[in-house]
Image: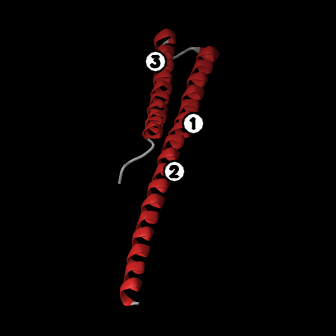
Amino acid sequence: MKQQFIVLRIVSLLFKVGATLMLLLGLASLAFGLGRLIAVTGGNGGIVGWVQVGAALVVAVWSTVQFMVLYAVGESLNVLMAIEENTRATSMRIVRLLALLSEEEKAAG
C-alpha cells in the first residue's frame, strides 16, 4: 500500500531528532557543570558550588522532560498515520468483500 503524508512523516522524524538533541544537550550541560565545578573549586565550592550543581540538575531534569514530550509528539504522529493506513486498508478489504458477495448473489439468482 502506498504511504501517504510524507511531510508529516518528516515532521515526526524532526520531532524525534530534536528530542534526542535536547536530551543530549541537557546531559552534556550536567556533565559540563559538574566538571567545571570540580575543576574550578577542587570539589570544595561552598554554597556557590551547590547552587551550580542544583542548576545543572534542574537543566538535566528539564531537558529530560522536554525529551519525553517532544518524542511523544513524534510518536503520536506515527500512531495517527498508522491508524489512517489501517482504516484505509480495512475499507478497501470491505469493498472487495462486498463486490465478491454481490457477484455471488448475481450468479446464484
Residues 97 and 86: in front is 97
Label 3 sits on what residue type?
A: Gly
Q: Mark 1 highlights which residue? A: 65
Disc 2 marks which residue? 80
Residue 1 located left or right of residue 51: left
Disc 3: CA contacts within 10 A as few (<14), some (14-19) or many (>=20): some
Q: CA distance from mark 1 to mark 2?
A: 23 Å
Residue at the image position 36 percent from the left and 86 percent from the top: 107
Q: Amino acid at mark 2?
A: Leu
Query: What residue is shown with label 3?
Result: 35
Q: Position of residue 88 (x, y in %)?
A: 46, 58
Q: Earlier in the sequence, mark 1 or mark 2?
A: 1
Q: Amino acid at mark 1?
A: Val
Q: Residue at x 48, y 60 (%)?
A: 87
Name, please, the residue furthest toward the top. 40
Residue at disc 1, secondary structure: helix
For the C terminus, which image quadrant? bottom left
Residue 49 position in % (x across, y down): 58, 17
Q: Position of residue 50 (x, y in %)?
A: 60, 21
Helix, strand or loop status at disc 2 = helix
